[in-house]
Amino acid sequence: MTSPYAPPVELGSLLFTLVEPARDAAVAYHRWYERDHFYSGCLVGPGILSGRRFVATRDLKALRLPRPLPASSPLGDAMRGSYLALYAVMAGAHATFFDWAVERVNDLHACGRMFAAREHVQTEVCDYRGGVFRDDDGVPAALALDHDYPGLAVLCLEREPGVDDAALARWLDDELLGPRLAGSPIAQCQRFTPRPLPAGAPGDTQAEGRDAASRQSLVLAFLESDPRAAWRAHVAPLAGAIEREGVARLGWASPFVPTRAGTDAFADELW
């Protein structure tokens, strides 16, 4: 019997937040987020599984696809969106965590513990929809952010009109992702679909139009190699196939590497 006080450890949803600090405040932003907000704004919340921060340096941004970015891309400019924070929430705890998170971040605003010199490029609350795993006994989805993957690729997709989410999921799993993982450094690909931001979320967490978001999907590809080494051979072909097949449009795809806790590494390599 499953106890209501000890639910299974399973991935349920995700908070995805891509941010661009002001160019004269990169180190200050990084330190504020790492030393305060990462914990006080999320990781101490109920139902949280894990969190991880990633960064896209200028050489990683140069690999972003497609080129040029479409006008509808949240990035706008390929150099925007330097820091990515991901937070995994346990299955069944979505409302508990996000109700807490809205109250907490508004409290942090009220007591002056936020950071003004930054821009939310893309903030999404997403439901986990499954994924593709290279190994039969590899890292479970719920542990992916805690595993020390040296690279991450993010693909932001928008389904073509007339293609439902189930059809896109089948195509991603059975045709695009599944056949390409064997023998590659891509250990797993997790799929997510956004939902509207919680009521009461601060105004600086800009929500995209919900009509577009209703057709959006995010794919997180966890890499067992530096993304620079994996990009052209293993990730760029995924982006190319998406563009060719007509099932979805690629809003953007980008490599990231994990930040190094307790250091200012990469803060001088963003632009």
Image (cartoon, rainbow, N blue to C red):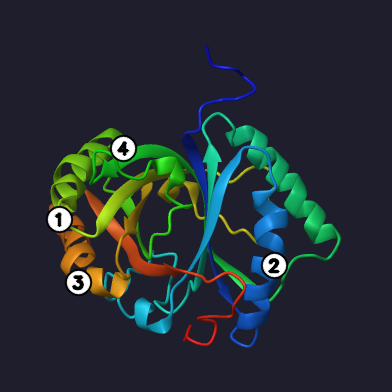
- Amino acid bearing label 3: Arg
Q: Is residue 199 above or below residue 79?
A: above
For label 4, the SS is helix
**How many labels sit on residues?**
4
Residue that numbered label 1 is attached to: 183
- Does the residue at mark 3 contact the one at mark 2 (Cβ under 8 Å)? no
How far apart are labels 1 and 4 at the CA level?
28 Å
- Answer above or below: position of 266 versus 206: below
Residue type (three-letter) at the residue carrying disc 1: Gly
Label 4 neighbour load within 10 Å: few <14, some 14-19, many 20+: some
Quadrant in which residue 135 is drawn: top left
Give the residue type that dot 4 points to.
Asp
Residue 65 falls in image quadrant: bottom left
User: Distance of mark 3 from mark 1, alpha carbons?
Assistant: 15 Å
Which residue position holds label 3? 232
Q: Answer yes or no: do the residues labelled 4 and 3 have beta carbons within 8 Å?
A: no
- Say left or right for 222 vs 270: left
Helix, strand or loop at disc 1?
loop
CA gap, disc 4 to disc 2? 38 Å
Image position, residue 207 (x, y; %): 55, 54
